[in-house]
Image: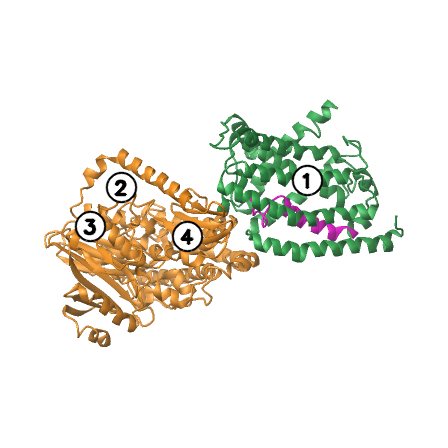
Chain colours: A orange, B green
Amino acid sequence: MDNLKSIFKPFDTKYVEDYKSSWIKVKLSYSTNLLDVAKLLYDNGLRSISTISATDFLEDNVMEINYFFEDLVNKKNCWLKCDVSRELEHCKIASICGIYKGALWNERETYSMFGVEFVGHPDLRPIIISQDFYDKFPFRKDFDWEEHEKNTVANINFISESFEKEEEENEKKLDVNSSEMILNWGPTHPSSGPIRLKVHCDGEDILGIDPDIGFVWRALEHLVTKKDFVGAIVAVERLCFMDNINSMVGYAQAVEEIAGVEITEFAKWMRVILGEVGRISSHFMGMGGFYNAMGLHTVAMWNMDIREFFLDFLESYSGARIATASVEAGGVRYGLAPEMLDELQKALDKFDATKDDIRSIFVKNPTMRSRASTIGILSKDDVYDYALCGVLARASGVKTDVRIDEPYGAYEHINMDYVTQDGGSSKDRLVQLFEEIEQSVDIIKQAKAHIEKKIEEGEFNPTKDYMVKVPKKLPKGEAISRVEWARGEVLMHLVTEEKAKSPYRLKMKAPSFNHTMMVDYLLKGQTLSDIPLVFGSLYVCQGDLDR
Amino acid sequence: MLFEIFIFPGILYILLWTVVLYWFFRKFMASLHKRVGPSFNGPAGSYQTLFDLSKLLTKESITPKGVNPYLFSLMPLLATILAIIPTALIPWSPSVLVVPSEYGLLGLVVLIGIEPFLLFLTGFGSNNKYSFLGGIRILTQMISMETAFFLSALSPAILFGTLNLASIVEQSSWLSFFVLLPSFMLYFIALLGLLEQPPFNIPDAEQEIVYGFYTEYSGTNYFLLKVAEFSEFMAVFAGGVVLFLGGYKGLFFDNFICLFIKMLFIAIVMMVIRASTPRITMKQMLKFSWKYLVPLTLLNIVWIMLSKILFFGTIV
């Protein structure tokens, strides 16, 4: 850490301080130093840029930009801040794309939402937002949403006109005598989900892919600022329904940090159980999606069959199967009754009874291996450069897992190790998914045994201990919180004002955003048949891609 | 004659086969998927396919902008008719054979082999990038798979010295069954490719090219294409049973029922493969076909000729 701090000695900084176990927090006095600092950080091993988050301080007339640099090997991270003016003509900062490739889309996002111009960015087009928001920068505090929504019909017409114009231009650009064409892979394509991949191809060979995202953009980061701290979890869990629990855990931790509240031991263990159940239900869908992309639906159906039992547990606990809203700041929402653990035991038994079939028929499937072990290969360097995380990173052999690197909840008491593969191909990502399910089941068993033991000893009171009170109004503060979500690291950056009833700014860094950036890189030069397979193996959810 | 055209083995039989097989596929697939399948319309959901059929027949058939409407709507009709014709050549039972012909096998193979051209034209006429890609894929697959299909269908003709399907069934025995077993397996693999079934469902891969040539079809036209697909199933299954498995001959009695059970057996094996094998790519299919399947079928012809000398004693 001291080594890292010494980097900042030559620069003018407002503060350099330790933050949590693995972070240092730095504020630069002048944004002009950014490029030099970034270069030094990169050379010191912080090779990944997790995300970029801007905060618009209307009263101070300042746009604060937060960079989150991570070192996936040595687990030393740096939270770098600097201020730029928020007036549009002066709201400029140097682009770090030349050093950090992973910043490509993150800078585009910050540009689209806040109008921060990244000087030197190779391709600074708006992303996520639809055409009617172009050059209006919707996340700025002075953007008038109501005014914008008055013209809904005109906006929709404008979007469809822009689309038609784009199609016409595509036809003009292509050579008439060649067999080149531009395919719209989505948003209604059977294997795309709500995303449009503009596939430029020559017959079956892919020349390039330009993903067009934002079809399920709900402006969640704006929505939370309109709700109170408890109501915001409804928006937070809509990051993606497949694993809705861990995202709520991340948000709740950030709120607790600002409020200065320590939750009970029992709630921590409950968060582990709920979070792993969420991860399992998501991974099952991920495996199914992978095989669906190859035209085999049996895996999805078999996995659904097991997943139902885990959802039964969530239903018995929270009353809802998918949108549970079961974690909030201060602990977990409900107490635990003994019969709920019986439901969980049923799910675990079901998994143990079925896992051998799934492994022998589908994880070791020779046809799948003949196709998937040679395409979509991500090396370790790709993982560092593009800040990939979760399943993708571990399938390439990178040992990163927030549950171990920066333990939260009760994970520090749990006996677990990194699960990794070596190849980094699409096949490895599928195998990784299955092995992580096994790991999660193991964690649930440990946590369940621990809770049962403590209840028996009388240390946990499951009907009372689950919640501590968190004040409705929070002090001025700022916190980040990281959790290992099903798809990878979720980083919540929460900013509050004095006596705030609702978040001032919540940045949700979700893994699919960085992962979708890889589509073009992985598929250039391959054939059309590889698109669904590689795209399916990236384990992308459009919910957290667009937010 | 009218009975044969309209009832058995004509149009009504084909419709009934389509409906029953569709329902059977759904139910059987569901049990492999650990699902229930259609359950509440009629006994075991058996009306469901009937309802689907009536729905498709009454729905509007949309013709996309910019296509030749005659070509677009003519192709499904032609495809259906061509797929139904082979039933006339097949000896369904000792007494039912609509067109007795010395060249039944030749007719069967040619009629089955022409079907993919029509499907290519449906894709070509749809004025849609995905459908066009699907059409091209059909042609590629047809060229590589039909070689193996023809060569393996040739083996019984060589063994029995005739192209007459009725005569092939009459001459078949347990000995010929075992001699023809390798040919049947090769025929079955080629059949999967020809019928675009997994793992060779490349031309109508929904995740890759949005069902290929089916993309633009709806309503009655879609229904006709589905009937064409299922009649082709029937022609190819029945062809396989007649050529290799002794047709209508059974253990205890010779009847249509025996032939039907054997056809269902082929369908079941096809379903199980469908439920457990993902799709392969075009490149893999081409490699598999030309590197392994076609040489094997050629070797198989040699085996048939040898066994004819060894077990059947004469060269005709």
- Looking at the rendered structure, the kind of residue marked 4 is Ile
Do discs 3 and 4 belong to a common subunit?
Answer: yes
Q: Are circles 3 and 4 on residues that touch, CB within 8 Å?
A: no
Residue B89 on image: x %, y %: 75, 35
Disc 1: which residue: B112
Instruction: Report, in whole angstroms, how far the alpha carbon at label 3 lies from the one at label 1.
Output: 67 Å
As for residue B188 lying within the magenta part, the answer is yes
Q: Nearer the viewer, residue A377 or A287?
A: A377
Do discs 3 and 1 belong to a common subunit?
Answer: no
User: What's drawn in magenta, residue-wise?
Assistant: B179-204
Do discs 1 and 4 belong to a common subunit?
Answer: no
For residue A209, the mark is 4
Q: Nearer the viewer, mark 3 or mark 1?
A: 1
Q: Residue furthest right?
A: B314
For residue A132, the mark is 2
Disc 3: which residue: A229
* Secondary structure of the residue carrying numbered label 1: helix
Instruction: Report, in whole angstroms, how far the alpha carbon at label 2 lies from the one at label 4.
Output: 24 Å
Residue at horizontal 80 percent and vertical 33 percent from the top: B100
- Looking at the rendered structure, the kind of residue marked 2 is Asp
Q: Is residue B47 visible?
A: no
